[in-house]
């Protein structure tokens, strides 16, 4: 971490006063996640640089998102900096629960000239910039609501040792996956063919389900006659859900309804699971030298519709935002700025924690690229680049995202448990329309 200390020592002398909020104490809340670990490992350097004490509060995935909504909607000042994604921020910004960050970014007394905001990939900056009009989100212009901290695209990753052993070709469509799963279960009933999230929460939709659904032509929302309308009961959606539900029945673990990303990662790492469709970094973390799965995990694009030649991959942006109710906004901003700086991002990447850095400078850094191209990471870099070319935000920007996607996750469980696909989607669409 000495590089970070040197970098910020120079910034202190040349640009802003990093000790202008010395003595402050702030709380940073985040999901329990390796991206959080990447920052937490470097916190002593920030505290040494600024004299600001940072207390991390880290929670399991689904518990964190619920607590985030409660904390901010009640305007509690107890959290100063929060981890968020684009979609949860859509629900928080219109109620003035997040602090717009433009004035901090543009203040030369608060933001170092070396911070280089334009070094973040343009698509990520654009996604976190919008205006609120009539209570709804208008993307592409407006205010900056959060700063990218890390991001992920959705891929299929698999234990090549298991697939090679049983002579199974990497599937490209849900029907191919269903067939591969039947072959795997016949060859070794102890192996779960496919790990995928299934909890009754929007996080189980934003990875495999929405990425594959887009390839089928499914839209969560569409504009009809000038009005926003859900597309989840469309013919394309019915076709997708029939294939997807059939795949889950044949491929996923019996614990599907309770599985989140923790179970997906553990299955791949232990070899109890042969394949997974989820965030690409999970495969990388389990390929690290010394781990049981090192060098055994390979990567491929996510599944696509049988009649489509191209795949789609949703994008998720882990971001740092400021609680509008924070009483220590200056100190909070220095922490956000430091945690998303070039050096801290690069340190996190090289440590194998913050795999998909949102900064272009990281992806041109030889130390990171040499590390990520090690043999144990198989085809991680090449697949990342090919998938990233097609990766895009798959959801329609709107307030009410969480409610609608939670309802979709519940409907998915019902269909997997045997409910009629067409009727369940009709009920889902009706529920969403009634809440719009």
Image (tube, rainbow, N blue to C red):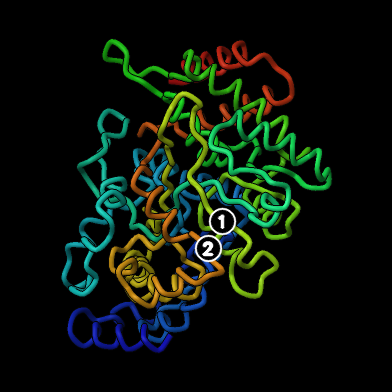
Q: Residue at x 28, y 56 (%)?
A: 121
Q: Residue 369: image x %, image y %?
A: 39, 71
Helix, strand or loop for disc 1: strand
- The residue sitting at the front extreme is 167
- Viewer-nearest residue: 5 or 171: 171
For the residues bearing labels 1 and 2, Cβ distance under 8 angstroms = yes
- The quadrant in which residue 382 appears is bottom left
| Residue closest to the eye, 73 or 44 | 44
The quarter of the picture where residue 244 lies is: top right
Residue 378: mark in rendering: 2
Position of residue 1 relative to residue 175, above or below, is below
Q: Residue at x 63, y 55 (%)?
A: 160
Q: Is residue 418 above or below residue 369?
A: above
Report the disc number at residue 298.
1
> Few, some or many C-alpha atoms within 10 Å of disc 2 (few <14, some 14-19, many ≥20)?
some
Q: Which mark is residue 402?
A: none
- On the image, the x and y values in percent for residue 212 come to 50, 33
- Res. 318 visible in picture: no
Q: Is residue 180 left or right of residue 362?
A: right
Q: CA distance from mark 1 to mark 2?
A: 6 Å
Q: Quadrant of the C terminus?
A: top left
Q: Residue furthest right?
A: 189
Residue visible at 58% across and 39% down in the picture: 171
Number of numbered discs overlaid on the protein picture: 2
Residue 225 lies, in percent from the top left, at: 28, 10
- Badge 1 or badge 2: first in the primary sequence: 1
Tag 1: Cα neighbours inside 10 Å, few (<14), some, or many (≥20)? many
Q: Which quarter shows the N terminus?
A: bottom left
Given residues 130 and 376, the one toward you in this image is 376
Residue 67's spot in the image, x, y percent? 57, 49
Q: Is residue 314 above or below residue 294?
A: above
Label 2 residue SS: loop
């Amino acid at each position: 971490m000495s590089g970070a200390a040197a970098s910020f020592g120079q910034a202190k002398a040349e640009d802003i006063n990093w000790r202008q909020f010395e003595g402050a104490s702030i709380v940073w809340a985040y999901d329990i996640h390796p991206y959080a670990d990447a920052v937490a490992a470097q916190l002593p350097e920030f505290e040494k640089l600024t004299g600001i004490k940072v207390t991390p509060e880290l929670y399991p995935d689904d518990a964190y998102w619920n607590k985030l909504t409660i904390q901010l909607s009640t305007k509690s000042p107890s959290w100063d900096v929060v981890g968020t994604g684009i979609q949860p921020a859509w629900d928080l910004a219109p109620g003035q629960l997040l602090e717009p960050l433009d004035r901090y970014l543009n203040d030369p007394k608060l933001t170092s000239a070396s911070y280089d905001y334009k070094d973040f990939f343009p698509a990520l900056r654009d996604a976190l910039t919008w205006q609120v009009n009539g209570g709804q989100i208008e993307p592409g212009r407006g205010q900056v609501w959060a700063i990218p901290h890390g991001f992920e695209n959705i891929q299929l990753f698999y234990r090549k040792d298991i697939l090679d052993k049983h002579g199974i070709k990497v599937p490209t469509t849900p029907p191919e996956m269903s067939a591969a799963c039947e072959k795997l279960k016949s060859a070794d009933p102890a192996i779960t063919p496919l790990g995928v999230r299934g909890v009754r929460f929007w996080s189980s939709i934003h990875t495999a389900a929405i990425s594959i659904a887009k390839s089928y032509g499914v839209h969560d929302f569409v504009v009809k006659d000038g009005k926003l309308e859900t597309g989840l009961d469309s013919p394309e959606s019915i076709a997708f859900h029939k294939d997807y539900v059939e795949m889950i029945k044949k491929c996923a673990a019996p614990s599907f309804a309770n599985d989140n990303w923790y179970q997906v990662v553990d299955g791949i790492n232990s070899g109890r699971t042969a394949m997974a469709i989820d965030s690409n970094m999970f495969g990388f973390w389990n390929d690290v030298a010394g781990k049981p799965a090192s060098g055994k995990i390979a990567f491929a694009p996510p599944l696509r519709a049988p009649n489509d030649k191209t795949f789609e991959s949703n994008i998720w942006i882990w971001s740092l935002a400021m609680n509008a109710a924070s009483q220590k906004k200056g100190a909070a901003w220095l922490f956000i700025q430091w945690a998303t700086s070039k050096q801290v991002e690069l340190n996190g990447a090289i440590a194998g924690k913050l795999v998909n850095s949102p900064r272009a400078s990281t992806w041109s850094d030889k130390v990171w690229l040499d590390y990520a191209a090690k043999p144990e990471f198989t085809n991680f870099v090449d697949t990342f680049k090919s998938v990233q070319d097609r990766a895009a935000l798959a959801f329609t920007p709107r307030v009410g995202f969480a409610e609608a996607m939670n309802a979709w996750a519940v409907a998915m469980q019902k269909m997997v448990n045997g409910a009629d696909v067409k009727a369940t989607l009709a009920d889902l669409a009706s529920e969403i329309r009634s809440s719009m």
